Image (cartoon, grey):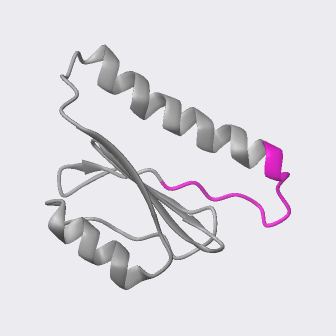
């Protein structure tokens, strides 16, 4: 689905899905994004990975990093993807990966 000139992928899975299968799906998406950057021959300007315990800290980081339009996953194991950006929700906080 394309919305606001962004690719949005929504995956609905049964509540009793095998966690290892869900991990495989997440890894396929991560590999897709990583390989797309390499295949497009887009020069990598910076790579950054950071974890946040609070939504406030995450939002401040995103603001300072120049990302005004993004979605924060609210559910554990939820992931938001955009070109060069992924935000993953874990039980104890969020992980942000930037590759541009």
Q: Is residue 71 or residue 43 the one in the foreground? A: 43
| Percent of width and height locating residue 65 | 18, 60
Q: Quadrant of residue 24?
A: top right
Residue 96 placement, left or right of 23: left
Q: Residue at x 18, y 50 (%)?
A: 5
| Percent of width and height locating residue 44 | 23, 28
Q: Residue at x 13, y 60 (%)?
A: 66
Q: Quadrant of residue 56?
A: bottom left
Q: Is residue 14 above or below residue 97?
A: below
Residue 70 placement, left or right of 34: left
| Percent of width and height locating residue 14 | 77, 61
Q: Is residue 39 above or below residue 73?
A: above
Q: Is residue 78 or residue 60 the one in the foreground? A: 60
Whether the magenta-drawn stretch holds residue 37 is answered as no
Q: Residue at x 22, y 15 (%)?
A: 41
Question: Where are the magenta residues, as a range?
Answer: 10-20
Residue 44 placement, left or right of 92: left
Residue 68 visible in the snapshot: no
Whether the magenta-drawn stretch holds residue 18 is answered as yes
Q: Is residue 10 above or below residue 55?
A: above
Residue 33 visible in the snapshot: yes
Q: Quadrant of the C terminus?
A: top left
| Percent of width and height locating residue 87 | 43, 58
Q: Residue at x 46, y 29 (%)?
A: 32
Q: What secondary structure predominates along the stretch shown in magenta?
A: loop
């Amino acid at each position: 689905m394309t919305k606001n000139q962004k690719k949005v992928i929504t995956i609905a899975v049964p509540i009793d899905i095998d966690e290892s299968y869900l991990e495989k799906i997440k890894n396929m998406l991560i590999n897709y994004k990583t390989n797309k950057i390499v295949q497009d021959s887009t020069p990598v300007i910076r790579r950054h990975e950071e974890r946040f315990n609070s939504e406030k800290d995450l939002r401040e980081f995103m603001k300072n990093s120049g990302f005004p339009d993004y979605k924060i996953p609210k559910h554990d194991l939820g992931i938001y993807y955009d070109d060069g950006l992924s935000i993953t929700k874990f039980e104890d906080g969020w992980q942000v990966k930037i590759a541009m």
